[in-house]
Amino acid sequence: MHSFGYRANALLTFAVTILAFMCAICHSLITSILNINWFQKQPHGNDEVSLTLNITADLQSLFTWNTKQVFAFVAPEYKTSKNSLNQVSLWDAIIPEKEHAKFWIQISNKYRFIDQGHNLRGKDFNLTLHWHVMPKTGKMFADKIVMSGYRLPDAYR
Amino acid sequence: MGWIGETVDSIKSIKIRQLLTQAITLGMIVTSALIIWKTLMCVTGTESPVVVVLSESMEPGFQRGDVLFLHMTKEPIRAGEIVVFNVDGRDIPIVHRAIKVHERQNTGHVDVLTKGDNNDVDDIGLYADGQFWLHRQHIMGRAIGFLPYVGWMTIIMSEKPIVKYILIGALGLLVITSKD
């Protein structure tokens, strides 16, 4: 009961348990700002939109000692008569370090914004910026910020 | 010669007892492992509560050899969630992120398109011929947490089965020869 082996084993188990607990309780606050402007539209069977996105974000406070990377993406969310929810990711990025977490970028959508149908004319939508935090070990968590009030043009261009 | 007979009998009975005890101990260990596994399946709501990452398509977030913990609820899949899915005709599950979600009114049926973070294109090429979306039945669970490196044992054991046999053999030997 008092041998070196038993003591080393007990100490190691205790240390690993504490470490696991520390990894689990880690969390952080978030601040970010986002600003979007948009552009054209081409139909071909299903409605498709091409946009230019202007994204400003500051996700630095998400990074802790247990953060491996933050995955951020921008997706419009909208409703149609057929679908109660449509989420279409337009742009995403992997942020590997705190230094890269504060950025401004202006680009066309990385992924095509295609509807299931012809519902996009004059469509109101919310633009959401999501972030997924992947830890070095433990539970992943995610959150988002929703900006409403966007609207697609009433006619094709 | 009577005492030889007696000695042989007593030796025989000890051996049988010991053997039975050890067989039961082994059985208990195996059964406990099975109980834990099945309970995990119940709690997490998925058939495989734990998977090992095999490819590099989700790097640098998930590396080969990482162990993922899965959970499945009735909540519909949403964009950004990392899902583990099976494609008809393929037996290895794939772990990628949902990038497009279309949920039907009333029925709650969802069409999901996935893509590996480290891939340039979405997963349409991985789905079955003529399939453009994943549905609820293809998805086994959402990844909610992970442990790095721990899965390497599984990868080694599946790529070199001899290691598996050596390990089981060694474990069995240890149980049989232990004096406790």
Image: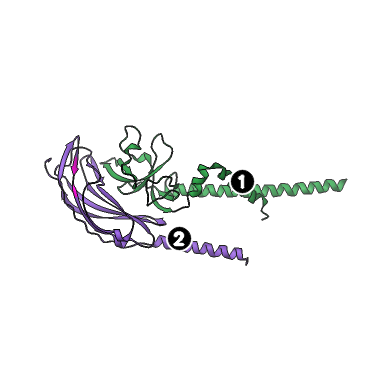
Chain colours: A purple, B green
Q: Residues within 10 Å of mark 2 (few under 14, many from 20)?
A: few
Q: Nearer the viewer, mark 1 or mark 2?
A: 1
Secondary structure at badge 2 equals helix
Secondary structure character of the magenta stretch overall: strand
B15 left or right, relative to A28: right
Which quarter of the picture shows residue A79? top left
Residue farthest to the top?
B129
At horizontal 42% and vertical 63% (from top left) the residue drawn is: A22
Q: Nearer the viewer, residue A104 or B165?
A: A104
Q: Chain of mark 1?
A: B
Q: Chain of mark 2?
A: A
The spot of residue A96 in percent (x, y) is 34, 56
Label 1 – label 2 distance at C-alpha: 31 Å
Q: Quadrant of the C terminus of chain A?
A: top left
Disc sitting over residue B31 in the figure: none
B172 left or right, relative to A76: right
At label 2, the amino acid type is: Ala
Q: Which residue is mark 2?
A: A20
- A49 falls in the magenta region: yes
Q: Magenta segment range?
A: A48-52
Q: Nearer the viewer, residue B170 or A152?
A: B170
- A121 falls in the magenta region: no
At horizontal 67% and vertical 51% (from top left) the residue drawn is: B177
Secondary structure at badge 1 equals helix
The spot of residue B53 in percent (x, y) is 43, 47
The spot of residue B20 in percent (x, y) is 68, 47
Q: Which residue is mark 1?
A: B169
Q: Residues within 10 Å of mark 1 (few under 14, many from 20)?
A: few
At horizontal 82% and vertical 49% (from top left) the residue drawn is: B7
Which quarter of the picture shows residue A103? bottom left
At label 1, the amino acid type is: Gly
